Image (spheres, rainbow, N blue to C red):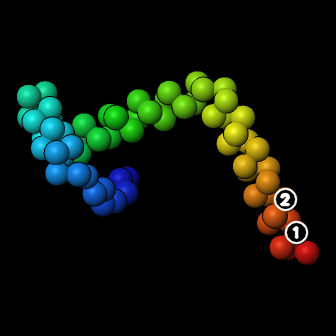
């Protein structure tokens, strides 16, 4: 299953993305998907990012618990 979303790109970036995709023989959509996959993989291996994510999730959980009382 795929989720559809809209991404607003500055004109110059959109033009460059279209050119890179065309030269690579792929779509702009696939170029964006690949870039997002690479970025998500990068942050998964970034210990500092993961520590900050865990901290924020713990804080959110505490707030939700307080609201549920």
Answer above or below: position of 2 versus 33.
below
The residue depicted at 88 percent of the width and 69 percent of the height is 66
Instruction: Please state if 14 lies on the left or on the right of 35 as rendered.
Output: left
Answer above or below: position of 59 versus 18.
below
Check disc 1: other Cα within 10 Å, few if <14, some if 14-19, many if 20+: few
Q: Quadrant of residue 6?
A: bottom left
Per the image, label 2 sits on a secondary structure element best described as helix
Q: Residue 27: in sight, yes or no?
A: no
Answer above or below: position of 59 versus 54.
below
Per the image, label 1 sits on a secondary structure element best described as helix
Which residue is labeled 2 in the image?
A: 62
Instruction: Please state if 12 lies on the left or on the right of 31 as rendered.
Output: left
Q: Residue 45: in sight, yes or no?
A: yes
Q: CA distance from mark 1 to mark 2?
A: 6 Å
Q: How many marks?
A: 2
The residue depicted at 28 percent of the width and 57 percent of the height is 8
Where in the figure is residue 56, as x and y percent of width and height? 72, 49
Near-viewer residue (13 or 29): 13
Answer above or below: position of 12 versus 41.
below
The residue depicted at 49 percent of the width and 29 percent of the height is 41
The residue depicted at 70 percent of the width and 39 percent of the height is 52
Instruction: Please state if 29 lies on the left or on the right of 20 as rendered.
Output: right
Where in the figure is residue 65, as x and y percent of width and height? 86, 65
Q: Quadrant of the C terminus?
A: bottom right
User: Given contact means CB atoms under 8 Å apart, are the residues at marks 1 and 2 in contact?
Assistant: yes
Q: Residue furthest right?
A: 69
Which residue is labeled 1 in the image?
A: 66
Q: Quadrant of residue 37?
A: top left
Instruction: Please state if 38 lies on the left or on the right of 23 as rendered.
Output: right
Where in the figure is residue 34, as x and y percent of width and height? 32, 34
């Amino acid at each position: 299953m795929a989720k559809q979303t809209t991404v607003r790109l500055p004109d110059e970036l959109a033009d460059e993305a279209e050119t890179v995709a065309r030269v690579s023989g792929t779509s702009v959509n696939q170029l964006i998907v690949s870039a997002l996959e690479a970025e998500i993989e990068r942050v998964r291996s970034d210990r500092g990012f993961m520590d900050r994510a865990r901290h924020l999730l713990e804080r959110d959980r505490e707030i939700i618990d307080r609201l549920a009382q």
